[in-house]
Image: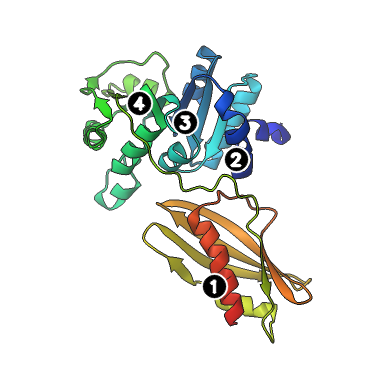
Amino acid sequence: MSWTLDKVILSPDSARLFRREELPRRGALFAEIGFGNGDFLVNLASARRDALCVGIEVSLTSLLKAARKVLRGGIDNVKLLNGDGSFLLREFFLPETVEGVFVNFPCPWPKKRHSKRRLINSLFADNLAGALKIGGFFELASDEKWFVDEARGCLLENGALEVEEIQHHLGGPIGTKYEQKWISLGKSIYRLRATKVSFFRTTSIVDWEEVTLDINKEMPKGWRMGKLGFMTNKTGGDDRFKWTFKDAFFGDDETGLLQVITADDGFQQKFYVRVIPRENSVLIKLDDASTVYRTPAVKESFKALAEEIGKL
């Protein structure tokens, strides 16, 4: 079954094609952020066969489990994305096209030092408002009242969203594993709903048109591939877009491989750049085993690597 997983899971490259060719032709669009074992998403897609249901999840384990569940069920209206929900909500969907967004029992990250990891903040509220169509809705379910209170405050910061009062202990029409668990333990469930009532758009930073990142750099005098090791732990960028060069590896064929980590508005990507010597130049290209969203930090990391090679 593994070879068919790409029918459900969209890599950055396949997401680019799907976004351009398929997304504009789809009817109703729903998204679930943090779908866990995939039960809610599968049930939603089964109930709304007319709609495209997109799941966004940071856990690769959950991604694979849900993909297999979708394939076994013969469900053809689900696509899965791996990454940060807030970022992909803004970047993957066309502006003001999503009918509904669900977040079910996300990790609340209760410790103060982990507060930046919480999904719902003012940036999330803006990205949500930018993705939803007017009349589109957002639903949050959690067993932590303080978390829902905080989320409500964040959503209220965006004037395009009409935020309802928190509802207590109401079972949803489509349940989740965690909902059933908490109810069986006698815990309270809190629900929050918001509706988009006026125009609001955000600005995408992913370059969905650019395909290649390759750079051909004139080979410096005295160039040796071993010099690539001097690049490790170099960093650059600004508050929004950052890159770091990590470990360097060298092949018997005189090629080099450099691990790169980028962050765009907190959205992190890890990938490898291959450095290939030619007769009078050095080719810098994305390794064939890597796939990335073409963000500002990714593109800047390639330019920075080319500049640094010129100095070595």
Q: Which mark is residue 35?
A: 3
Inter-mark Cα distance, 4 to 3: 15 Å
The answer to whether the residues at label 1 and label 4 have Cβ atoms under 8 Å apart is no
Q: Earlier in the sequence, mark 2 or mark 1?
A: 2
The answer to whether the residues at label 4 and label 3 have Cβ atoms under 8 Å apart is no
Question: Which tag is nearer the camera, tag 1 or tag 4?
Answer: 4
Q: Is residue 307 visible?
A: yes
Question: Which tag is nearer the camera, tag 2 or tag 3?
Answer: 2
The answer to whether the residues at label 2 and label 4 have Cβ atoms under 8 Å apart is no
Establish if 44 lies above or below 159. above
Q: Earlier in the sequence, mark 1 or mark 3?
A: 3
Inter-mark Cα distance, 1 to 3: 36 Å
Establish if 110 lies above or below 234. above
Q: Secondary structure at mark 1?
A: loop
Determine the residue positioned at 61% across, 66% down. Answer: 258
Please indicate whether residue 77 sits to the left or right of residue 283 in the image.
Answer: left
Q: Earlier in the sequence, mark 1 or mark 4?
A: 4
Q: Which mark is residue 16?
A: 2
Determine the residue positioned at 55% across, 51% down. Answer: 294
